[in-house]
Amino acid sequence: MEVGTGGAFTALQDGDTVELFSGFQGGQHVFVSLRAWELTTLSSRVELSLERTSDGDRVSVPYEVNLRFSPSLQPGEPALLEGLLLQVPDASKAVGREVRLNAAFESDSGEHGADSRTVTLQWASDLEP
């Protein structure tokens, strides 16, 4: 499994910058996307979080949702979950800070994966990725 960002999957490396978007209803969020290879069951429990690396404090709301990966279109390509909204309730605790983006899933048949990236959050210049 690999964690990325964006409305469509964009790969992340440790040290990258991730944009924090202002929502239309007053909140703010990061777009998270996932890809996973060789899944036989697409329905999965997905967990996401953002934690400050300086103290381990969570800066996102809890995110544990049952979702379904989109199947891969070609053999050997990954199944995708794209454009997931991970809310950040207090931007002042996250913007300009180094955070760890954590993602994990477990499928209904017990397949599982986890990944994380250390990134810095900045305000987005556009409304959507």
Image: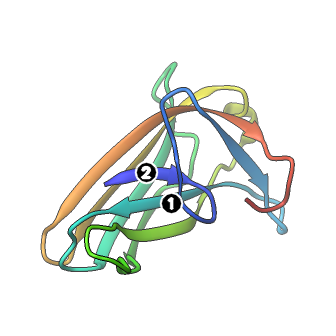
Q: Position of residue 63 (x, y in %)?
A: 47, 60
SS for dot 1: strand
Quadrant where the image shows the N terminus: bottom left
Q: Is residue 15 above or below residue 87?
A: above
Q: Position of residue 24 (x, y in %)?
A: 84, 68
Does residue 86 appear to the left or right of 126 in the view shown? left
At label 2, the amino acid type is: Val
Closer to the chain start, of discs 2 and 1, is 2
Whether residues under marks 2 and 1 lie with C-beta atoms below 8 angstroms apart, the answer is: yes
Q: Position of residue 57 (x, y in %)?
A: 50, 32
Who's the residue at 45% across and 69% down the image?
Answer: 81
Q: Is residue 96 above or below residue 123?
A: above
Q: Quadrant of residue 77?
A: bottom left
Q: Quadrant of residue 121?
A: top right
Residue 64 vs residue 85, the one in the foreground: 85
The residue labelled by disc 1 is 33
Does residue 37 appear to the left or right of 18 in the view shown? left
